[in-house]
Image (spheres, rainbow, N blue to C red):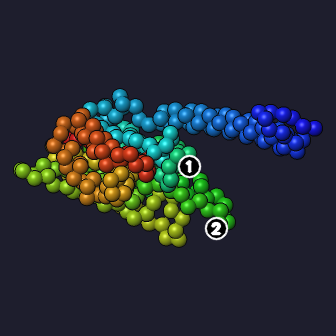
Amino acid sequence: VYLIRNRYRLTYKEIRSRLELEKSKSLIELQKEEVEEKNEEIKSSIRYAKRIQDSLLPPDELMSELFHQNYFVYYKPKDIVSGDFYWAAPVTTTSEKAYQLSLAAVVDCTGHGVPGAFMSIVGSNFLKQSLTEKSVNNVAEALDFLNQKTISTLNQSSNTESKVRDGMDVALIALDYSKNKLYYSGANNAIYVFRKQTEETEIITLKATKQSIGSVSDIIQNYHLEIFDLQKGDTIYLFSDGYADQFGAIDNKKLNYKRFKAILTEAFDLPIHKQKAHIQSRFESWLGNAEQTDDVCVMGIKI
C-alpha cells in the first residue's frame, strides 16, 4: 500500500510508524494531563492543610493583649505549609497570690513543608497541654513535658531502626509584666535581649540547652531555666535558624548570625510596629532571586 503526500511515497511500514508516533504523543499528552490533575489535587489538599495550620497560630487580638500591642512576628514559610510556627498563651499561676504570665514561643521543627507541618501540629498541641499539666510550673518544665510527650508519641516501637529522629528546636518565654521578669528556656534556640545603653546597644544572649525536643539519645537532660530582669525599652527577639541560614543571591553565602544581629540592631532603633518591615526588607534584599532555604520566623516583643 502506498500513500502519496507532498510528492513523497510512504510505505505501509512508514505509515504505521507515523501512526504509532501520533498514538504515543496522544498517550503522553493524556499522562501529562493526569499528572497535572493529580498535582492540583495535592496542592489543593496542602492549601487546605495550610488553613488548618494557620488556625493553630495565635490570633493578632490575643498577641496584642498578651504583649500590650508592642510586638511583631515576621513569618515566612518556605513552602505552602511550614515547619516553623509561633505560639502564645496566657497562664495564671497557682500560688497564693496568683498573677498572669504571657507565654510566647518560636518553634523550628525538623524539615519544612508537609513533614515539618505535621511536627508543628504535634508541638502546638503539647504546648497547649502543658498549660494544665500539674507537673509543669515553669517554662523549663514545659519543655521537659514537651520532650517526654514527643518522644513517647513518635517512638512507641521498641525497634531502634523505626525510631523517629525528627524533633523540634524551641525558644519558650514567660513574661511577668508586673515584676519585669523574663523566664526563658530553650531547646537549641537561644534568644536575644536588646538594651539601649547611652549611645550603644547592648545585646544579651540567653543560651539554650543543647538538646532538641524529641531527642532519642541515651542520656536525656532536663532543660535549663533562665530568669532575667528586664528594663523598660528592652526588646526580646525569638527566632528560628531560617533567617540567619539563608543563602544570598549575590555570593551564595549564608546571611549568618553576625549579619542577623546587625539587622536586628538597625531594627531595634525603630518603633516596634516598623521593625517587621525593616527585617523583611533586609531578608528579601539578601535573598534576591535565590531560592528560600528554609522556613523563617522572627518574633520581637518590646517592654
Task: Say whether residue 294 is left or right of residue 24.
Answer: left
- Quadrant in which residue 185 is drawn: bottom left
Quadrant (top left, top right, bottom left, bottom right) of the N terminus: top right
- Quadrant in which residue 74 is drawn: top left
Farthest top residue in view:
61
Residue type, mark 2 in image? Thr
Residue 244 in sight here? no
Q: Which mark is residue 148?
A: none
Nearer to the camera, 296 or 58: 296
Q: Which mark is residue 115?
A: 1
- For marks 2 and 1, the one nearer the N-term is 1
Q: What residue is drawn where x is 54% and y is 53%?
A: 149
Nearer to the camera, 71 or 241: 241
Q: Is the residue marked by circle 1 packed among few (<14), some (14-19), or many (20+) residues within 10 Å? A: some
Q: Residue 165: percent from the left, percent from the top?
A: 55, 61
Q: Check the image and report above or below for 45 versus 108.
A: above
Q: Residue 302: percent from the left, percent from the top?
A: 22, 41
Farthest front residue in view:
7
Q: Which mark is residue 160?
A: 2
Task: Say whether residue 212 is left or right of residue 65.
Answer: right
Nearer to the camera, 260 or 6: 6
Quadrant (top left, top right, bottom left, bottom right) of the C terminus: top left
- Determine whether the residue tagged by mark 1 lies in a helix, strand or loop: helix
